[in-house]
Amino acid sequence: MTLSAKTVVLIAIGAALYGIGGLPMFGIPVFANTTLKPAMAVLALFGVLFGPLVGFLVGFIGHWVTDLFAGWGVWLTWVLGSGIVGLLIGLYPKITQDRLEKGKFNKLDFTLFVFLAFLGNVIGYGCSAYLDSVLYAEPFVKVMAQLSIIAAGNTLLIAIVGHFILTAVAKRKQQSYNLKEAD
């Protein structure tokens, strides 16, 4: 598998934005070792706009960067979870047959976007919670509480920010698409 220069640059930019935006100073503490971070919207948008591979690598590398700069050490279980979130949200273009690229973003598309965000958070961070419990002997009740809070919070955050941005992207793409059709 080879990555184009454009894809590598997209991954680097997305991971940097996610990594820096995930730092505690930009987040809202919601539970023990759990922060609601606006960077999740960056992860979701890179996944939706550029696909599952970019989504996975932005989440994986970006979370790694967050952990490194935050000073609490790299938690590979949660790094993997962020990668899985980006991967699952990145399935959006395939499922919708690239409707967003054609300037289409309706209520069904938005519902699918929110569903993929929720599914990504539950599966991705569910894996993280399970692995923390098994590998690090973290209390199961604690990691399940983290999972529940963060899956709900991230999904809500992604839905709100994503709606505005994806609506704007669709409007912009529609203008470009109309120009191409007129040629």
Image (cartoon, grey):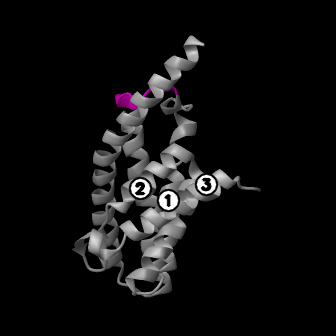
Residue sitting at the far right: 1
Q: Is residue 77 above or below residue 161?
A: below
- Does 179 sit left or right of 151 as displayed? right
Kindly report the distance in space between the C-alpha atoms of the residues bearing marks 1 and 3: 12 Å
What amino acid type should be assigned to the residue bearing mark 2?
Val
The quarter of the picture where the N terminus appears is: bottom right
**In this figure, which residue is indicated by the disc labeled 1?**
14
Residue drawn at the location 55% of the way across and 12% of the way down: 182
Q: Is residue 161 above or below residue 142?
A: above
**In this figure, which residue is indicated by the disc labeled 2?**
42
- Does 143 sit left or right of 88 as displayed? left
**In this figure, which residue is indicated by the disc labeled 3?**
53
Q: Earlier in the sequence, mark 3 or mark 2?
A: 2
Residue sitting at the far top: 182
Locate residue 72, reporting x and y percent. Answer: 39, 87
- Does 9 sit left or right of 69 as displayed? right
What amino acid type should be assigned to the residue bearing mark 1?
Gly
Q: Magenta includes 94?
A: no
Kindly report the distance in space between the C-alpha atoms of the residues bearing marks 3 and 2: 15 Å
Locate residue 27, reporting x and y percent. Answer: 27, 69
**Mark 1 or 3, closer to the camera:** 1
Q: Is residue 106 above or below residue 28?
A: above
Q: Could you tell me which secondary element the residue under label 2 belongs to?
A: helix
Numbered badge on residue 68? none
Q: Which residues are magenta?
A: 102-108
Q: Contact (CB < 8 A) between labels 1 and 2?
A: yes
What amino acid type should be assigned to the residue bearing mark 3?
Leu
Q: Could you tell me which secondary element the residue under label 3 belongs to?
A: helix
